[in-house]
Image (tube, grey):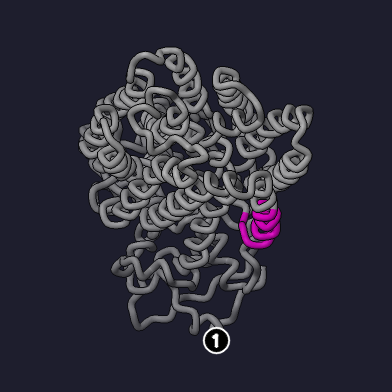
């Protein structure tokens, strides 16, 4: 590979300057007290620990998905309309379409503030602490369940959203960090809503699956359908809202059995605990070469990433770390996920089916079937992500979604009964493309693309952008259908068409690489002046921890760096080839 000369390199400061890092052979580096490591061993090991991590993360996203979708399923029930007449859309009150959208979308504002607050608490308190602090969510859920007027319900929705914003911005990192991207990638497809994405991989396979499951959305539709017939009591809508408390109690109870993230522990100097967690996740002895390789790889990465005082300003830096580019990619990805129009379907499924001529009961039955299909379609991505790749899934999803939206617009213009029947089928098709290409992949991709030093703020900002545009889309869709009807589909068709070139030209492939490997990809692209997308598709990029990778990152074995020293020039030897999974 062609690398820059020392004259060129001196104008590009190394992120490894100002640190003392001795990279010795692993066998000579095992300086931890075995008794100390054993004293910090987690309660669970191996697949049991992996399953526990995935279960808690899945429960967190189930909670998110359930609470996000519950209101859209209840607003057309007669008991809910009787308690909150502000949501009844009729000719005499056309402004109620906006209020109907508002009561659904205001939840996203709370989620936005929750995600942004993780900018400050994510790394300071660790991954488990924010998940424990859920008094605000419990309070919000109780206030929603006991509301008797419109204003208290709005306040409760915001309060609940705040707690869920913390959960969703933290769970991908919490789930991915202990597993070191080997056993479980929570690609929190669970958002669709919240399943158990466990996938055991071999020692060299660094992708988990994409088990983007819509089971909570599916269960929610079934609960709504069952209670729809309880039209004599407010239990018709209070019980579905109260059920979210079950998920919260399960998550808070189980989180105490999970270890902290090894990366976070290393950052805090708790190396024995980090080694114990890695050993437990790998289900191997601490002296095992694979465990030690992972442990010292993390220590090396953390040493590089903590070589200077961290701040939010780092999100705007370039250089070898390419933090600004990676943050923008994560934020734009989440924005695009919302602009696909998925919440047009998931939030307004019952209303859409009613607009297509179905009765109240049939609309709910169809919505339940739609949720079931969503669940089944998401399973395909679980198996495809390792073989198709992240970029291909995104492109397939966006192209399919664009075509479906165009067809829905044409059929909406025709407006006869056969066209309405086909439109119902196409709404199922849209769910299929989204579940396959975008559902949980967005959460996984953002956690992967972020730099190790800026993961917490990048995840928080990307999640915040998700909530912002989630709010925008949900607020707009209701009034849009009320005013321009089927033309709303044209807007989302155009947005999906725009997504295709953005993904193709600007989004690197992250599949088949560890989080540390991706640092090498961006550093190599920077020092060679190549496009990171093209570098990510190469098979000869050195593995993190190898001598070639250390040189690319500006870290040389056995060399001590000082602020006044110029970093050594990387060698031109090719790296070890690696075929993405």
- The front one of 242 and 34 is 242
The answer to whether 496 appears left or right of 523 in the picture is right
Q: Percent x, y for residue 448? A: 50, 50
Q: Which residue is mark 1?
A: 7
Q: Residue at x 39, y 59 (%)?
A: 454
Q: Quadrant of residue 245?
A: top left
The local crowd at label 1, few if under 14, some if 14 to 19, many if 20 or more residues have their Cα within 10 Å, is few
Q: Over which residues does the magenta segment extend?
A: 494-508
Q: Percent x, y for residue 271? A: 27, 47
* Secondary structure at numbered mark 1: helix
- The front one of 149 and 250 is 149
The answer to whether 260 appears left or right of 71 in the picture is left
Q: Residue at x 36, y 50 (%)?
A: 109
The answer to whether 269 appears left or right of 452 in the picture is left
324, above or below 569, in the image = above
- The front one of 391 and 26 is 391
Q: Percent x, y for residue 152? A: 25, 39
Residue 502 inside the magenta-drawn segment: yes
Q: Residue furthest front?
A: 92
Q: Quadrant of residue 132?
A: top left
The answer to whether 323 appears left or right of 205 in the picture is left
Q: Is residue 172 visible?
A: yes
Q: Quadrant of residue 378?
A: top right
Q: Percent x, y for residue 250? A: 30, 24
Q: If the image is split into quadrants, where does the C terminus sit?
A: top right
Magenta span main SS: helix
Count the marks.
Answer: 1
Q: If the image is split into quadrants, where does the N terminus sit?
A: bottom right
173, above or below 544, in the image = above
Q: Is residue 42 visible?
A: no
- The front one of 559 and 306 is 306
């Amino acid at each position: 590979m062609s690398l820059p000369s020392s004259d060129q390199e001196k104008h590009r400061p190394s992120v490894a300057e100002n640190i003392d890092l001795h990279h010795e052979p692993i066998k000579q580096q095992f300086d931890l007290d075995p008794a100390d490591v054993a004293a910090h061993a987690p309660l669970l090991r191996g697949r049991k620990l992996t399953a526990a991590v995935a279960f808690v993360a899945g429960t967190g996203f189930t909670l998110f998905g359930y609470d996000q979708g519950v209101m859209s399923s209840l607003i057309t029930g007669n008991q809910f309309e009787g308690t909150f007449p502000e949501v009844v859309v009729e000719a005499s009150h056309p402004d109620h379409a906006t209020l109907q959208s508002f009561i659904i979308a205001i939840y996203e504002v709370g989620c936005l503030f929750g995600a942004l607050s993780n900018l400050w608490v994510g790394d300071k308190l660790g991954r488990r602490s924010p998940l424990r602090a859920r008094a605000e969510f419990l309070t919000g859920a109780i206030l929603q369940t006991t509301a008797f007027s419109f204003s208290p319900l709005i306040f409760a929705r915001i309060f609940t959203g705040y707690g869920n914003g913390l959960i969703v911005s933290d769970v991908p990192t919490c789930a991915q960090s202990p597993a070191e991207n080997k056993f479980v990638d929570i690609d929190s497809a669970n958002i669709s809503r919240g399943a158990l994405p466990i996938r055991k991989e071999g020692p060299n396979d660094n992708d988990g699956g994409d088990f983007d499951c819509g089971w909570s959305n599916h269960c929610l539709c079934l609960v709504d359908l069952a209670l729809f017939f309880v039209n004599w009591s407010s239990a018709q809508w209070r019980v579905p809202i109260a059920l979210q408390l079950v998920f919260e109690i399960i998550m808070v109870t189980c989180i105490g059995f999970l270890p902290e993230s090894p990366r976070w522990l290393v950052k805090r100097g708790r190396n024995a605990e980090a080694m114990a967690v890695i050993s437990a996740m790998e289900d191997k002895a601490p002296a095992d070469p694979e465990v030690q390789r992972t442990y010292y790889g993390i220590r090396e990465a953390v040493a590089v990433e903590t070589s200077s005082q961290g701040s939010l300003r780092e999100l705007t830096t370039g250089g070898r770390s390419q933090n600004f580019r990676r943050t923008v990619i994560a934020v734009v990805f989440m924005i695009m996920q919302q602009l696909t129009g998925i919440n047009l379907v998931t939030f307004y499924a019952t209303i859409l089916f009613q607009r297509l001529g179905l009765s109240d009961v049939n609309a709910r039955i169809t919505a339940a079937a739609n949720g079931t299909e969503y669940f089944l379609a998401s399973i395909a991505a679980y198996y495809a992500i390792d073989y198709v790749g992240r970029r291909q899934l995104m492109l397939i999803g966006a192209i399919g979604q664009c075509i479906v939206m165009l067809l829905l617009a044409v059929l909406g213009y025709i407006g006869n009964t056969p066209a309405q029947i086909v439109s119902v089928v196409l709404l199922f098709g849209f769910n299929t493309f989204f579940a396959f290409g975008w559902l949980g992949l967005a959460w996984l991709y953002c956690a992967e693309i972020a730099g190790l030093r800026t993961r917490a703020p990048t995840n928080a900002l990307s999640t915040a952008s998700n909530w912002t545009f989630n709010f925008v889309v949900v607020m707009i869709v209701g009034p849009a259908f009320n005013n321009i009807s089927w033309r709303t589909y044209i807007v989302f068709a155009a947005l999906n068409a725009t997504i295709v070139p953005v993904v193709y030209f600007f989004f690197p492939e992250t599949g088949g690489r560890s989080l540390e490997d991706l640092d090498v990809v961006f550093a190599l692209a920077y020092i060679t002046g190549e496009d990171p997308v093209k570098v990510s598709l190469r098979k000869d990029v050195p593995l993190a921890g190898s001598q070639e990778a250390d040189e690319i990152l500006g870290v040389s074995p056995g060399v001590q760096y000082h602020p006044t020293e110029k970093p050594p020039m990387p060698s031109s030897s090719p790296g070890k080839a690696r075929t993405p999974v």
